[in-house]
Amino acid sequence: MRIKERSYMLPDGRKITIKSAGPEDALKIKLHREKVCRETHFLAREPEDGPWNLEMIKARFERVANDDREFMVDAYLGDELIGELGITGVGPHVKYLHRAYLGMSILQEYTGEGLGSFMMATALKQAKANGYEQVELGVYSDNLIARHMYSKMGFKEYGMNPRAFKLPDGSYNDEIIMAYIFE
């Protein structure tokens, strides 16, 4: 599905457009993801994993744009995609239909500007309207800024997957499992 378009003002007065990306935005999504994974180790993918597959991105965003419950909340500064957040159902089976998974990335130069909180609030409101009862995510244990923002938004830590990520230097990082339960 596509969310209703809205705006967010950065503290310096620049206007960010919040909207859903579709298959027509596949190249922007590909470039954004490749840039973000070069900026930080907080994504599951490394630059060494190779380029993102443009056709797979198009197909995925075509499916999401036409889905009744799944959606994207993307942030654009002019034509540049600077942040994306996706809500995806955990599974198609009846016992999973109440659960959604959230993934999020924002270019580093736009973190700490309130944009992530705005995108998250937009996504949580839409997820509830779409019938989800809880939203789950995984976050690197050393991503303290994201963990703080998720906690501030109402997510609770409920578990940890030890050594979930092995970094290129051979070190490991734990994954903190968090959930937001609508009440």
Image: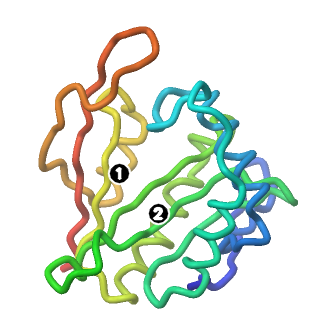
Report which residue position mark 1 lands on.
150
**Within 10 angstroms of label 2, few (less than 14), some, or many (20 or more) residues?**
many
Q: Quarter-wise, where is residue 33 in the image?
A: top right
Instruction: Please give left or right for residue 59 compared with residue 153 in the image.
Output: right
User: Image quadrant for the C terminus?
Assistant: bottom left
The residue positioned 49% from the left and 53% from the top of the image is 104
Marks 2/1: CA distance? 8 Å
The residue positioned 28% from the left and 60% from the top of the image is 136
What amino acid type is highlighted by mark number 2? Met
**Residue 11 locus on image (x, y percent):** 70, 50
**Label 2 close to label 1 by CB (< 8 Å):** yes
Q: Is residue 28 above or below residue 131?
A: above
Q: Quarter-wise, where is residue 141 in the image?
A: top left
**Residue 2 locus on image (x, y percent):** 61, 83
Lower sequence index among marks 2 and 1: 2
The residue positioned 61% from the left and 81% from the top of the image is 65
Q: Secondary structure at mark 1?
A: helix
**Within 10 angstroms of label 1, few (less than 14), some, or many (20 or more) residues?**
many
Q: Quarter-wise, where is residue 84 in the image?
A: bottom right
Report which residue position mark 2 lands on.
120
Q: Is residue 90 above or below residue 128?
A: above
**Residue 76 locus on image (x, y percent):** 75, 60
What amino acid type is highlighted by mark number 1? Tyr
User: Image quadrant for the N terminus?
Assistant: bottom right
What residue occupies the far right of the structure in this picture?
A: 78
Q: Secondary structure at mark 2?
A: helix
Instruction: Please give left or right for residue 96 compared with residue 30 in the image.
Output: left
Q: Is residue 176 above or below residue 11?
A: above
